[in-house]
Amino acid sequence: MKRKLKLVKWVLAIALLLTSIIPVRIAIAFYQTPVPQAIFVLGSDAERMKFAAQFWQSRQNLDIWVSDFAWNLDVDRRIFLQYGVSDAKLHLDGRATDTVTNFTTLAEDFANQRLQHIYLITSDYHLRRARAIATIVLGSQGIVVTPVAVASQNQSSESLVRVLRDCGRSFLWILIGRTGASFNPRLKSSPFAQFYSKTNIQ
């Protein structure tokens, strides 16, 4: 019991430390790079891809990064090509299994590209959760996001419970490098579960 209590105290202490450091890193990133350097689109919705392609028309100097399920990437590419976005401007990534892993699978890539500020494109109902995850995951890497909402038919944003759950998973990723995505029952029942377990995507 004492060991568990001690562990909880350590986790809380680290979480408090992180929550104080992340805003500082975000502020520095925004100060150094006030204008976004790339476009980041969350997948699973063709409308987001069409919106991003149109959004890019007035920002053609920027690369577009897409995080989607692997089996959607061919469709995503075709949509962007239809709008005149060349392959040279596209970075399509199929490693994600959910919204948290949309960010954790690409955080290192963004950092390696020295990106400090990116546009974040997703559906309006999804934006609150995505922005919260981005603040933790990308913020911990010194990357700030400017959110851009895609209008949808959904009338309400996602629940606070889902937001808090994924914030917790994001902190877990910072602490131990895993997000707990392997516990997702939908992933386990998916025909792609074996692929993900082999590639150790968390």
Image (spheres, helix red, strand yellow):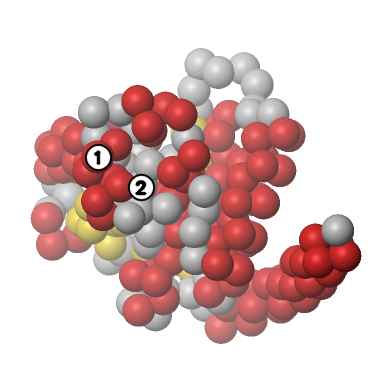
Looking at the rendered structure, the kind of residue marked 1 is: Gln
Q: Name the residue nearer the viewer: 14 or 124.
A: 14
Q: Is residue 202 above or below residue 159?
A: below
Circle 2 residue: 96
Mark carried by residue 194: 1
Residue occupying image coordinates x 23% and y 58%: 91
Q: Is residue 12 visible?
A: no
Q: Name the residue nearer the viewer: 33 or 77.
A: 77
Give residue 73's position: percent from left, percent from top. 19, 41
Q: Is residue 156 visible?
A: yes
Residue occupying image coordinates x 49% and y 23%: 152
Give residue 31's position: percent from left, percent from top. 62, 80
Residue occupying image coordinates x 38% and y 42%: 97
Q: Is residue 122 above or below residue 66?
A: above
Looking at the rendered structure, the kind of residue marked 2 is: Ala
Q: Is residue 195 left or right of residue 188?
A: left
Q: Is residue 174 left or right of residue 79?
A: right
Q: Name the residue nearer the viewer: 20 or 97.
A: 97
Q: Is residue 189 left or right of residue 19?
A: left
At label 2, counting other C-alpha atoms closer than 10 Å, the crowd grade (few under 14, some 14-19, many 20 or more) is many
SS of the residue under disc 2: loop
Give residue 179's position: percent from left, percent from top. 52, 53
Q: Name the residue nearer the viewer: 163 or 23.
A: 163
Residue occupying image coordinates x 30% and y 28%: 190
Give me the C-alpha separation between circle 2 and circle 1: 14 Å
Q: Is residue 198 above or below residue 110?
A: above
